[in-house]
Image (cartoon, rainbow, N blue to C red):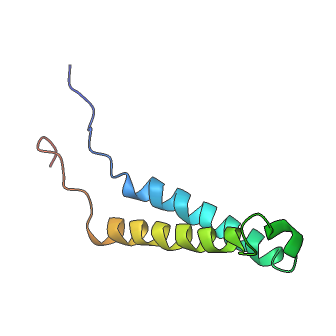
Amino acid sequence: MSQPDAHLDLRLPIGGLFTALGALLVGFGAMTSGETARYVKSGGLNINLWWGAALLVTGLLFLLAARRRPAPPSPGSR
């Protein structure tokens, strides 16, 4: 009984997830940028916009890394 290929490049799904969540947060932060009462607890800082931007950049870096250096093939595959 042979084992399935155990090599899965996690950079693609993690990068996609971070990029999607970052885009959602950036959009929400941009739409609520004029609501100062919403950001009182964060000291007036639009935390959704900043964390969304950080997640978006991180996700894009993961996707870029997955595209530039694909996962090495498993020893048993050709």
> Which quadrant holds residue 49?
bottom right
For residue 28, above or below residue 13: below
Residue drawn at point x = 54 percent, y = 66 percent: 55
For residue 9, above or below residue 33: above
Q: Residue furthest bottom?
A: 34
Q: Quadrant of the N terminus?
A: top left
Q: How many marks?
A: 0
Residue drawn at point x = 38 percent, y = 72 percent: 64
Q: Residue furthest left?
A: 75
Residue drawn at point x = 82 percent, y = 75 percent: 31
Residue drawn at point x = 81 percent, y = 68 percent: 40
The percent position of residue 72, horizontal first and vertical second, equals: 19, 55
| Left or right placement of residue 68 versus residue 1 in this view | right
In terms of depth relative to the viewer, which is nearer, 1 or 55?
A: 55
The percent position of residue 19, horizontal first and vertical second, equals: 55, 65
| Left or right placement of residue 33 versus residue 15 in this view | right
In terms of depth relative to the viewer, which is nearer, 19 or 34?
A: 34
> Which quadrant holds residue 4?
top left
In terms of depth relative to the viewer, which is nearer, 20 or 68?
A: 20
Q: Residue furthest top?
A: 1
| Left or right placement of residue 73 versus residue 53 in this view | left
The percent position of residue 76, horizontal first and vertical second, equals: 12, 40
| Left or right placement of residue 15 versus residue 69 in this view | right
